Amino acid sequence: MMHPELKNDRFLRALLRQPVDVTPVWMMRQAGRYLPEYRATRQKAGDFMALCMNADYACEVTLQPLARYPLDAAILFSDILTIPDAMGLGLYFETGEGPRFRKTIGNLADVESIPAVDPERDLAYVMNAVTTIRRELNGRVPLIGFSGSPWTLATYMVQGGSSRDFHRIKQMLYSAPETLHALLDKLADVVIDYLNAQIRAGAQAVQIFDTWGGILTQPAYREFSLAYMNKIVAGLQRESEGRRVPVILFTKQGGQWLELIADSGADALGLDWTTDLGEARQRVGNRVALQGNMDPAVLCASPEAIRAEVARILASFGNGDGHVFNLGHGITPDVDPEHARVFIEAVHEFSGQYHR
Amino acid sequence: MMHPELKNDRFLRALLRQPVDVTPVWMMRQAGRYLPEYRATRQKAGDFMALCMNADYACEVTLQPLARYPLDAAILFSDILTIPDAMGLGLYFETGEGPRFRKTIGNLADVESIPAVDPERDLAYVMNAVTTIRRELNGRVPLIGFSGSPWTLATYMVQGGSSRDFHRIKQMLYSAPETLHALLDKLADVVIDYLNAQIRAGAQAVQIFDTWGGILTQPAYREFSLAYMNKIVAGLQRESEGRRVPVILFTKQGGQWLELIADSGADALGLDWTTDLGEARQRVGNRVALQGNMDPAVLCASPEAIRAEVARILASFGNGDGHVFNLGHGITPDVDPEHARVFIEAVHEFSGQYHR
């Protein structure tokens, strides 16, 4: 497929630590419930998964924040739990409870009974969404594809949903590690195929969301989360349409392990707000770019406070390239869309001085 | 008051980095729902606060884990929210919801209307519990007193209870910082009086629980949590009964800021399990002792896994003194009491080799 030339490539350039005019910015969960137009489309679609599975609706909500704000990237609208759903676990959403699975993984027999998943075939709706969004983006900004990390997907598959203390999967980790490794290995292979299929369909960068890696000890993080992300990074197609496809790893609460994650082969690391961006930059040196890291709660504060926090974070990173501005976690439904605008505009307004 | 000589002072010695025969161990929330005898006493007492407010019951549950296990310290049975309750906010517990307050703090007028609290008078039930426990301990092991940190207490007072994203207090922090500082300053003064009163009543070490400091950015942590803990440490009576009264600071998810916390003047830092103990020791040098840091979820795994994890953590700290073994957070109600025994005995069994 021929694609129109990319008009704004700041985001891709920053991920590769190449010079940019201003710091690029996007927001995790930028297509989301804080936008009235999103709520309207979701109403039309029915439920959340119906929204993900219909390429036209998924495209519509992906583009909504771009119609409002001068964002530097679009991100595929989908869910991290599409893979376990394709594995037959039966994903559903309970109001106020978050994602749930009808079946869970408890032992090695459960792992071995997971059917083979071919993302091109079994997750065709995701690839259709990618293709549709790329067409409608028409070269305006790059499109980010994504997946959950094997460890993060496994937490939902073993716990059966969100968890507070993750006792079931930690019990498996400590008492039956070989079962967990079998599950994670299977997941890593599917994530590789899934992200490569997204890249073939048109994703121009990919992010791996390791939402729950930060609940582990350092050795357990290395063995059960990072090792499988390393395997994925090594298995990804890193060029498409004549350009490098940057890979971003984001382990929430992973600030203590940045040196380890920087050795993964990824191009960039996502940071939550608890990590000081300037210190992180010193620690990873010129090995990777950094993405982050404003606390999304700041968007509930006054416009003056939002602008002050953007200025503080930009100053913390300092002069030079290799920074993509983002929130440290997804934007929340209670945010006033005008506050999101203040945030995005402040990043562009204040960052030029650091890129001369 | 004359107290009998302390028979086991490993815990106090380790906090001051003095030589010990084996690594001392206690568990956060060691008097708790995982013990059937605790559940029985709580049933007798009525509700949770009735248990805290009755010195005989509080003493009974404090001593229960010591009757079962060779623990090296007792910790006062109480709640971190006694101070806001004494400030008239009306603490109550909703089943499955955790602590709640009838009144919350939303603005400067609310802060200014908080009545003065004299812990000796308004929290006399806590001091009675300390005195009773010391008498019944009869010098067996030292007694730890404690308080919540000002920031952690403020989160409950502003949010009205537990929270997931802490938007109300973060809105105050970013949009009305002077209101939050007024609240924190008032809390710090009361915490100083509260802990000094516990020390006068017989507490032989004190711990400040900063359960929610780890949800902040580094500059916000310094300004809104650590600064007030520093003030408290500077205001504490550090000697009693002819011995130093060690102070432990525990910021959950504070592993990125250990160097800063080590400058607080505290004798020891508590660590959760995400921080590598050996790396933490290198980072803080000989400024402070370290307390921690096994993931309480490990207690749900097999006895072999528990012993392996104890051995790993002891090896990570390595040879020498200045380590108090503990969990990285409170023990949970689903733990088999026999697994707690395996944990405690393994610490003593495996640690002698590191103290020669």
Image (cartoon, coloured by chain):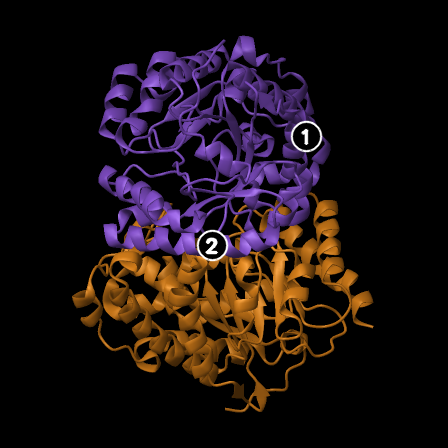
Chain colours: A orange, B purple
- Mark 1 vs mark 2: same chain? yes
In the rendered image, the vertical position of residue B144 relative to residue A32, given as above or below: above
Specify the subunit that label 1 lies on: B
B216, above or below A217, in the image = above
The image shows residue B237, relative to residue A289, as above or below, that is above
Instruction: Give whichever of B136, B337 is nearer the camera.
Output: B136
Q: Position of residue B1 (x, y in %)?
A: 50, 9
Res B96 label? none
Q: Quadrant of the rendered structure where residue A269 is? A: bottom right
Kindly report the distance in space between the C-alpha atoms of the residues bearing marks 1 and 2.
32 Å
Q: Do the residues under discs 1 and 2 have CB atoms within 8 angstroms?
A: no
* SS for callout 2: loop
Near mark 1 (Cα within 10 A), the count class, few <14, some 14-19 or many ≥20, is: some
Crowdedness of circle 2 by 10 Å Cα count: few (<14), some, many (20+)? Answer: some
Residue B227 is situated, as x and y percent measured from the top left of the image, at: 68, 36
Say left or right for A277 vs A328.
right
Q: Nearer the viewer, residue A129 or B241?
A: B241
Q: On the image, numbered disc 2 is attached to which residue?
A: B318
- Between B31 and A326, the one lying in front of the other is B31
A168 relative position to B272: left or right: left
Marks counted in the figure total 2
The percent coordinates of residue B177 (x first, y second) are: 70, 35
Q: Residue B275: in sight, yes or no? A: no
Q: Position of residue B333 (x, y in %)?
A: 29, 36
Name the side, left or right, on which B133 lies relative to A205.
left
Query: Residue shown at 25%/54% (left/top)?
Result: B304
Residue nearest the viewer, comparing B352 with B214: B352
Residue at mark 1: B231
- Image depth: mark 1 or mark 2 in front: 2
Residue that appears at 45% across and 44% down: B292
Amino acid type, callout 1:
Lys
Amino acid type, label 2:
Gly
